[in-house]
Image (tube, rainbow, N blue to C red):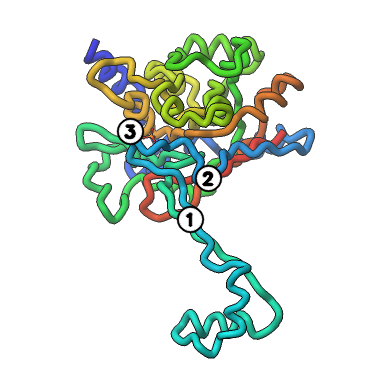
Amino acid sequence: MAEDWREVAKRVRNWGKWGDSDQIGTLNYITPEKIVAATRLVKRGRSFPLCAPYEADGPWSGSFFRRNPIRLMIVHGGDEQIADHLEGFGGSVGEAFKMMYQGPMRFADDVIVMNLQSGTQWDALSHVWYDHKLYNGYPASAVTGLGTTKNGIERVAERGQVVTRGVLLDVAGKNGVKHLAPNTIVTPEELDATARAQSIAVEQGDVVLVRTGWWGRFVETRDGEAFLTGSPGLSWRCAEWLHDKKAAAVAVDNVAVEVSPAEIEGTTLLLHMLTLREMGLMLGEIWALDELAADCAQDKVYEFMLVAQPLLIPGAVGSPVAPLAIK
Ligand code: UVW
């Protein structure tokens, strides 16, 4: 059993498929024709934001190496009194305020400190590896304390490549529950059954969105520990399903796309290893899918144009994203 996943790894490996210098993997399935076809899915002019709030009350409870975002105001309304004391301030900041405050205009500025992986995000292809190799055979040594020189998120951002047909597979909705039970394994068969129930087919170049209801449960309970440890999610066997469908990427409303805990003893984040490292397929995590799902259940249309551009952060292994599903 322990070797099974390595056999699957060989079957789903896309290394070399788009050339030896490729760094965007299955996003290559999104062709210009695919983007044009996606625009034709916009019929009603309704846009659904799929981004969860980046805030101090997020799901990270402190028992992990991630923290919730910290946002600080660095210039705000209380600074107006600086205008009365500008002569006392020197240096570049003092000079900047003298320039900014010379007329009636006042302003505010803020700063955010966060893991790029704290909220709604894309995992770049350099986020996870094993046996010292990244997607397309690049050495894992490319990922250093300075960032990554291979498979960084900027490779995707500079191409503007995440514009395509999105398909929602609402597994929770299909089972008539607000959210799946803790630690439910979503199998490839369940994905097929959901697609059948929704009369939709996943096509080459689609981004597949899978709803477990788990983000909605966190919003209701604010139980970060359960959000992390109890997560329902995809089985590692879904790697082959995504490979066969030629999906461009997959995103889920849970913390890690895949189910927690791992299905095979002695492994962690097996689906990550197969998708990011073998297939070159990006993972979207903590996507807020409830409002979109409610609309899809109403009009029975589970396809839309999806725009999910990561931030252009050179050398980063992931990025926050504010995806839009447009119907
Ligand atoms: C890890 O925790 C390593 O990854 P992710 O956030 O993608 O689940």
Residue corresponding to mark 2:
54
Q: Amino acid at mark 2?
A: Tyr
| Residue 228 vertical position relative to residue 194 in the rendered view, above or below | below
Foreground mark, 2 or 3? 2
Seen at 27% across and 42% down, the residue is 138
Q: Nearer the viewer, mark 1 or mark 3?
A: 1
Q: Residues within 10 Å of mark 3 (few under 14, many from 20)?
A: many
Quarter of the image holding residue 37?
top right
In this figure, which residue is indicated by the disc labeled 3? 277
Q: CA distance from mark 1 to mark 3?
A: 30 Å
x and y, in percent, of residue 46 in the image: 75, 37
Q: Secondary structure at mark 2?
A: loop
- Residue 286 is situated, as x and y percent measured from the top left of the image, at 50, 34
Q: Earlier in the sequence, mark 2 or mark 1?
A: 2
The answer to whether 18 appears left or right of 6 in the picture is right
Q: Secondary structure at mark 1?
A: strand
Disc 1 to disc 3: CB gap under 8 Å: no
Mark nearer the N terminus (2 vs 3): 2
| Residue 261 position within the rendered picture, expressed as x and y whole percent measured from the top left | 35, 20
Depth check: 28 or 19 in front?
Answer: 28
Whole-number angstrom distance, CA of label 2 to CA of label 1:
9 Å
